[in-house]
Image (cartoon, rainbow, N blue to C red):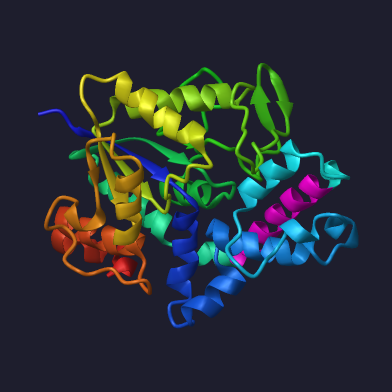
Amino acid sequence: MPLRKVAYLLGAGATHAEILTLEVNSPNEIFRASNGLLISDVSKRVMKNAQANPRFKKNVEQVTFIEGPVNIELLISLFESNRISDVDFKVQHLKTLVHDDITQRLSPTRKNRFYLHKALFELHKLVDDRENLTGIISLNYDDVLDNAYERIHKAKPNHCHTSDKGDSCPLLQLHGSFSWTNIKTYGKTKAISIIPLGINKNYLVPPYNFIWSRAFEILAQCDVLRVIGCSLNQNDIGLVDLLFKAHLARPDAFEIQIIDFPIVGDQIKNSYGFFQRIVKLEDIEKPLIADIVTDAGSPFKVWLRAKGERMLADAINQTKYLKKCL
């Protein structure tokens, strides 16, 4: 019987979960306001810092209200598409603040304590006779995924920056990474700019054309896509279009497992019901998840524990990272 081909799609919620597990005793709202890495958390902090700059505030105070929820991607796109004075500075200022906000919360000391991504790679290394990990697709700019891969596999990850696919599991950062400073494409070594926040994104320039093409191949061939910490926000229409194209290239639909809070699963099913095999957390490999996941918990951690126990049984206690999820 052929191995089941499994791929992952990671959003900001995956990295956010790493911090959450380290701050389990902190009040949720206080923690999120200071350290949360969900785009809503980052957006609020960025807007507060941006309004401390008089040049940024000039002529946009009426459209930069920060007391309510903020969609920083949409705001940047609206700035770019309207005739706002000094728009280049304002947009670049927001993007720089986003970069600084995320990197400041991912210090080397804190990242070294993370274990969920490491546990994920550890799990697949131990069960590769039952599941074939074909690739991980990430929307994040951070290097948490890279660090975890290197810790488990003792090798550099395969980012697919060229047409050479390589032999190792692809780690595909669809929007790039803050750490891509010496990347070789077409025989030249240079720093690669991220695809910045905003709704209108250009994926046709190298190395993104290679990355997105490889992501399409992985999705078109997988049996299961596990979505962790990603709400499939409609701001990223390119990602939704990629999932759509991958479905059209297949004779049948692949399963999309939403490893997130039940409310997120409901929202995704309501928005993307045309993808016929969306499965919420509580219905994955039923009855894999016996616990009710609350807002104070981490669905990523809950799923890792349940999946590890099912596939490894008592041997999970001999693992280095997976056992931390127990």
307 shown above or below 290: above
Q: Nearer the viewer, residue 270 or 29?
A: 270
Q: Nearer the viewer, residue 44 or 112?
A: 44
| Residue 148 lies within the magenta run | no
Residue 158 seen in the figure: no
| Residue 91 lies within the magenta run | yes
Percent x, y of residue 106 = 60, 61
Percent x, y of residue 250 = 26, 20
Percent x, y of residue 90 = 81, 49
255 shown above or below 320: above
The residue depicted at 38 percent of the width and 31 percent of the height is: 243
The residue at the far front in this view is 62
Residue 26 seen in the figure: yes
Percent x, y of residue 97 = 74, 56
Q: Which residues are magenta?
A: 90-109
The residue depicted at 42 percent of the width and 62 percent of the height is: 115
- Quarter in which the N terminus is drawn: top left
